[in-house]
Image: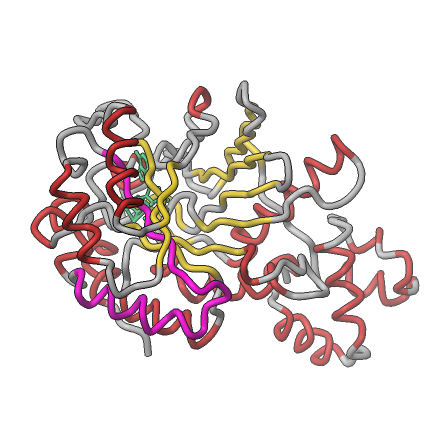
Amino acid sequence: MNLLGLEPTALSAYFAGRGDKPFRARQVSRWIHQRFVDHVGAMTDLGKALRESLARDAAIQGPAVIRDTTAADGTRKWLLDAGNGNAVEAVYIPEDDRGTLCVSSQAGCALDCAFCATGKQGFNRNLTTAEIVGQLWHANRALLADEQGRPPITNVVMMGMGEPLANFDHVVPALRLMLDDNAYGLSRRRVTLSTSGLVPWIDRLREECPVALAVSLHAPNDALRDRLVPINRKHPLAELMAACLRYLPAAPRDFVTFEYVMLDGVNDSASHAAELVSLVRHVPCKMNLIPFNPFPGTQFRTSPRARILDFQRRLADAGLVATVRKTRGDDIAAACGQLAGQIKDRTTRRLATRIVPVAAPR
Ligand code: SAH
Ligand code: SF4
């Protein structure tokens, strides 16, 4: 049993099943997720007999690191083994007042957005809960070893490789561990899930684990979004806006973040800005404009800085809060949309492309 991937209720059930006292789950959770130990032997307040029987039965299996790279701006990227020649990436983004970890949820992605390196790699498989939360465990552990002191990760964004809502059953337990007081203890507003718009799963997230929500919009009308974000053909904009409105009452923040990648000559004109204002006029939101980050083989270019600022001003003039995302770590291909990990085995891709967009919850 890999204890790293057991959400709070599952860890309690595990100890109950062994006939151990209920408080063992809390104790062990703190050792794993707050002190980041990697073996049962290190849990010194457990008693020798319990440690020995646990060690026979269970382990704490973190991700295997293939590469560890630090960018000029301090952004750090770990390439983590996902088996069979596949790998995923986790990115640490240090800022003055916080440390953010960008976490991956799938090896590759089946949704194939036109401007995304991960999408272009294809899909291999869903990460397990241990592999998802293991990114946070590993980053805290690695950074603490350097710096000593408080756990360095204060915020998590599910914005790495993959579509987190297409791997709901493994992502939600990982989110619960991020929020649990005996694990990472992050507040809901410090954990953000970004989705390309899997509408039925947005509703289920609201019911089961409403963290801060970011939605990848990227286009103000269905014709353009159908091309850029193909899942739009299944869940068009009107449906997506309605899902955002349903989400808000449960959300830890009173707005949804809309992400909008700025693509030169594609979605960045004055009329696109006007259309965008009208699209979101009933949805309390913040607009996050993302300068497109290029990757090998892409036909897109990023909008010139002046056009991005003009677009931002048009949104602001209409009363929207609009920020331009600062590009971080692009010299090590760690910026948004540049995460490619490595996907060798894509045999599951066609299957997944058919299944993921149509699968509805329950
Ligand atoms: N699959 C989820 C989360 C991962 S992507 C989603 O799509 O929301 C995180 C953000 O980076 C998304 O808004 C995504 O659209 C954006 N992105 C993808 N490729 C990009 C690129 N090349 N440049 C800038 N942003 C990109
Ligand atoms: Fe997948 Fe998100 Fe990339 Fe689209 S932008 S291909 S949903 S990871």
The reply, left or right, for residue 146 in relation to residue 95 is right
| Picture residue at 54% right of the left edge, 50% below the top | 156
Residue furthest toward the left?
Answer: 223
| Picture residue at 18% right of the left edge, 36% below the top | 268
The reply, left or right, for residue 62 in relation to residue 119 is right
Q: How many marks?
A: 0
Give the residues in magenta. Answer: 237-262
| Picture residue at 79% right of the left edge, 55% below the top | 40
Image position, residue 105 (x, y; %): 43, 51
Q: Quadrant of residue 174?
A: bottom right
Q: Give the quarter of the figure containing the C terminus.
A: bottom left
In this rendered view, identify the residue nearer to me: 254 or 301.
Answer: 254
Query: Up-down: is 144 above or below 72?
Result: below
| Picture residue at 11% right of the left edge, 54% below the top | 222
The reply, left or right, for residue 213 in relation to residue 189 is left
Residue 348 visible in the picture = no
Q: Quadrant of residue 26?
A: bottom right
Q: Quadrant of residue 130?
A: bottom right
Query: Up-down: is 144 above or below 195?
Result: above
In this rendered view, identify the residue nearer to me: 163 or 83.
Answer: 163
Image position, residue 36 (x, y; %): 73, 49
Image position, residue 37 (x, y; %): 76, 49
The reply, left or right, for residue 11 in relation to residue 19 is left
User: Does the magenta run of residues contain 249?
Assistant: yes
User: Does the magenta run of residues contain 348?
Assistant: no
Q: Give the quarter of the figure containing the N terminus.
A: bottom right
Snapshot colouring: secondary structure
Q: Quadrant of ligand 1?
A: top left
Query: Up-down: is 231 above or below 244?
Result: above
Image position, residue 6 (x, y; %): 61, 65
